Amino acid sequence: MPIIFRSTPIVEPFTFDSLGNHWEQDQIFRPKGYPFYHYLQSESGTGIVTVEGQTHILHEKEGILIAPFLRHSYQKQSSQWFTLFATFTGTVESSIPQMLGNRQVILTDKSQGERIAQLLSECIRRYDSLPVDEKRLSIDCYSLLMNFVDGVHTQKLTDDPLYQRYIAPVIEEIERHYDRELTVESLSGQVYITPQYLSRLFRRFLNCSTYEYLTSCRIRKAKEFLITSPRLEVQHIAQKTGFSDTSHFIAVFKKITGMTPLEFRKLN
């Protein structure tokens, strides 16, 4: 039962935070949800999944995608229940809701489940080949996400020249220097356009403003520190992620995630 958790910095548009299969599923209860989009599929046996009070039964090869921070639980209905799973992140994680039509819960049928299981198995095998091909995995992650798209218009961001010319360089700057004093004005100046136009392009491609993306990136990095560095104090995490004021960091973190940094750390 291979289980893989990401241990490297996020540099690709889409990537897995975790993935696994052949997992003998235990009972799970998450009153505050999970911090990433989370997919669960029944490999064998039957399970009961409850999301925000709504119950779903997963038979073999059927699955469910759950949006971040939705209260949910699941347990086996048969004597044994084996599952596969994947959780999704990436530098353009904030675009996932738009891709999925802002649906909070998506159910997959057996035909979709067969494709997803095969693709996920291939992704797990890629982790056995060192060094890991992160770009190939990012493409696979995007392909897996496309299985949840139902009539929602999507396009490959890398195919659009406006994205390549203006958005990609700014994202790279944010991802590399999120701990510095970045502003929308300084970021737009690097690509020689106005802050207003840059934010319009971010809204067009990623469904968020430039400032919202910068803040989202900083909070995502803060989540990584909270999980991977359990002894690092909150005020130090605030400084390491570009926040000059700890109280402001805690307020922004709670606004975005629905919990304080310490509550998030306990959850994970």
Image: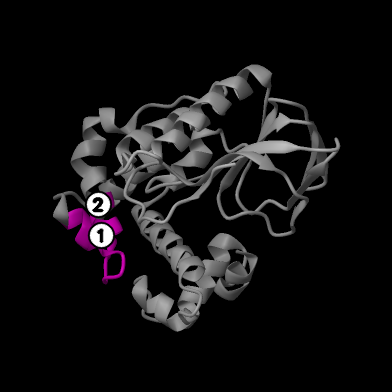
Q: Is residue 233 above or below residue 60?
A: below
Where is residue 106 drawn, in percent x and y? 65, 33
Q: 36 or 24: nearer the eye?
A: 24
Q: Quadrant of the N terminus?
A: top right
Read off the magenta span: 171-189
In the displayed structure, 118 sits above or below 195; it is: above
Residue 37 vs 157, above or below: the answer is: below
- The residue lying furthest to the top in this view is 111
Residue closer to the observer: 23 or 208? 23
Q: Is residue 137 left or right of residue 113?
A: left
Kind of residue at disc 2: Glu
* Residue in view at x 58 percent, y 75 percent: 262
Q: Is residue 185 visible?
A: yes
Q: How would you rate the neighbour count of disc 2 (Cα within 10 Å): few for under 14, some for 14-19, many for 20 or more?
A: some
- Whether tag 2 and tag 1 are in contact, CB under 8 A, the answer is yes
Residue 164 sits in which quadrant? top left
Looking at the image, can residue 204 be seen? no
Residue nearest the observer in this picture, 73 or 153: 73
188 part of magenta stretch: yes
Secondary structure at badge 2 equals helix
Whole-percent x and y of residue 240?
35, 74
Name the mark on residue 176. Answer: 1
Task: State the mark number for residue 43.
Answer: none
Instruction: Tally the numbered discs.
Output: 2
Q: Say which element carries label 1.
A: helix
Q: Is residue 119 above or below residue 89?
A: above
Label annotation for residue 172: 2
Quadrant for the C terminus, please: bottom right
